[in-house]
């Protein structure tokens, strides 16, 4: 058991408020007994008095207390009944019972039901009362201190857990940045080789202009080159961010409808495109917004491809754009299974993919970087079915 010095040291060291109130409530239906008890206690204690159990409960609900000293034989409510109810209301307060009768059943009841700290016989000696009161108060202080220490420990544990979570998040981000740097170096080489190939394909396209080529084949080549160019720009964006930590935007007034149409033209080259019911809803009289046309097209292309890969053949994929609060809102939604709950909270973090081993988990991360660079927001919006991603750009 902690002694007073140990408790004081703990309270001091941990900055806990003092747990001893030195408040004592004396309850007796005889006024003379109240005056006697108060007379020799009030030098060291803050003494409150009551002449009935009901009055005592009322007082106990209003003043700081450590101990209640109650007479057993009182009309209306006995001392044990009083302390039983008091224990329910104020479990941090201990009770002492005074009685002039050798009432063993009452003593057992006091110990079992009311958890009375001490049972003293009348007539009593003041020293016995003071000693019992000091011991009860010390027990109260110890219990309260332990309770406060447990609360403090729980709070400190939560703070430590939060700090560890924050540290882990920082470590994960450093790992992400390291991996992004590695991927950025790889994309630089891939982009260089891809550009060399595109020079040859552009030359072939130019030669096709002079030859009699079926329009369908010409369209396939044109769209294929557009897709390759978008890939080059995407790789360039990733390489740019991995080197500088930011994105350079070519900001111009753009037509949001044109962004959707260009994105659909690029995605139409996806092998699964014709297997789905892909549709668009482009509102008329859309306000223009200041943005980077290529990078915003890249965002919508990414969302559309995710929707195509998340749905089965024959299922619906819809891309739309509409005015919203002076700006515009793009949306891509599908009838697929939706986003797994376990990755929803980190969906826009790097290397998080709903495709398992089939994806790098960088598409939504890059989309978010682009949208945030435009002072916009991108979010997964809850709907009745499937998944719906919404991109909102300000005016």
Image (cartoon, rainbow, N blue to C red):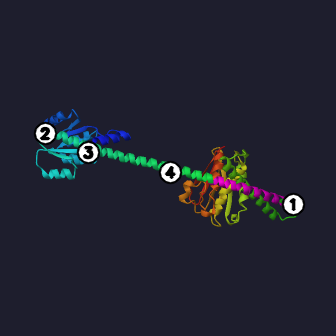
Badge 2 or badge 1: first in the primary sequence? 2
Q: Which residue lies furthest to the right in this view?
A: 210
Circle count: 4
Position of residue 128 in the picture relative to residue 357 (left or right): left
Q: Mark 2 points at which residue?
A: 125
Q: Position of residue 329 (x, y in %)?
A: 64, 50
Q: Which residue is drawn at 66% across and 54% down?
A: 182
The percent coordinates of residue 372 (x first, y second) are: 63, 47
Q: Which SS type dominates the magenta stretch? A: helix
Residue beneath the point at 69% across and 56% down: 186
- Measured Cα–Cα span from mark 4 to mark 3: 39 Å
Can residue 281 be seen? no
Question: Alpha-carbon distance for marks 3 and 2?
Answer: 22 Å
Regarding residue 104, the answer to whether it shows in the image is: yes
- Residue 278 appears in which quarter of the rendering? bottom right
**Secondary structure of residue under mark 1:** helix
Q: Is residue 196 magenta?
A: yes
Q: How crowded is mark 3: few (under 14 residues within 10 Å), some or many (20 or more)?
A: many
Looking at the image, residue 96 sits to the left or right of residue 357; the answer is left
Mark 1, residue position: 207
Where does the image place residue 391, in percent across and percent down from the top left? 63, 51
Q: Is residue 374 above or below residue 355?
A: above
Residue identified by numbered label 3: 139
Tell me which corner region of the image, top left, top right, bottom left or bottom right, holds residue 271. bottom right
Q: Which of marks 3 and 1 is nearer the N terminus?
A: 3
Q: What stretch is highlighted in magenta?
A: 179-204
Q: Where is residue 123 in the image (x, y as percent from the top left)?
A: 11, 41
Secondary structure found at label 2: loop
Crowd rating for badge 2 (residues with CA inside 10 Å; few <14, some 14–19, many 20+) = few
Q: In which quarter of the image is the C terminus?
A: top right
């Amino acid at each position: 058991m902690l002694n007073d010095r140990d408790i004081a040291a703990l309270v001091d060291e941990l900055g806990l408020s003092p747990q001893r109130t030195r408040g004592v409530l004396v309850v007796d239906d005889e006024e003379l007994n109240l005056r006697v008890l108060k007379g020799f206690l009030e030098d060291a204690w803050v003494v409150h008095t009551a002449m009935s159990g009901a009055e005592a409960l009322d007082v106990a609900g209003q003043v700081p207390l450590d101990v209640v000293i109650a007479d057993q034989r009182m009309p209306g409510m006995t001392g044990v009944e009083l302390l039983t109810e008091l224990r329910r209301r104020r479990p941090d307060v201990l009770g002492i019972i005074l009685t002039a009768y050798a009432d063993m059943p009452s003593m057992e009841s006091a110990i079992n039901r009311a958890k009375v700290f001490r049972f003293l016989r009348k007539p009593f000696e003041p020293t016995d009362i003071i000693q019992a009161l000091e011991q009860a108060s010390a027990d109260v202080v110890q219990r309260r201190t332990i309770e406060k220490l447990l609360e403090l420990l729980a709070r400190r544990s939560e703070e430590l857990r939060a700090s560890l979570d924050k540290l882990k998040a920082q470590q994960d981000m450093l790992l992400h940045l390291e991996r992004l740097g590695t991927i950025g170096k790889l994309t630089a080489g891939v982009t260089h080789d891809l550009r060399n190939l595109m020079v040859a394909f552009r030359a072939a396209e130019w030669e096709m202009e002079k030859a009699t080529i079926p329009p369908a084949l010409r369209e396939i080549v044109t769209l294929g080159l557009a897709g390759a160019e978008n890939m080059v720009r995407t790789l360039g964006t990733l390489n740019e961010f991995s080197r500088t930590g930011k994105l350079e935007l070519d900001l111009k007034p753009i037509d949001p409808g044109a962004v959707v149409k260009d994105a659909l033209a690029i995605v139409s080259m996806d092998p699964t495109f014709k297997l789905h019911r892909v549709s668009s809803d482009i509102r008329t009289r859309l306000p223009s917004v200041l943005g980077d046309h290529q990078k915003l097209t890249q965002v919508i292309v990414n969302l559309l491809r995710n929707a195509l890969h998340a749905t089965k053949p024959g299922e619906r994929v819809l891309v739309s754009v509409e005015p919203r609060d002076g700006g515009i809102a793009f949306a891509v939604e599908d009838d697929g299974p939706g986003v797994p709950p376990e990755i929803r909270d980190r969906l826009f973090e790097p290397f998080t993919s709903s495709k398992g081993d089939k994806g790098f988990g960088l598409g939504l991360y890059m989309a978010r970087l682009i949208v945030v660079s435009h002072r916009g927001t991108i979010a997964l919006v809850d709907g009745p079915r499937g998944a719906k991603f919404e991109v909102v750009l300000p005016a």
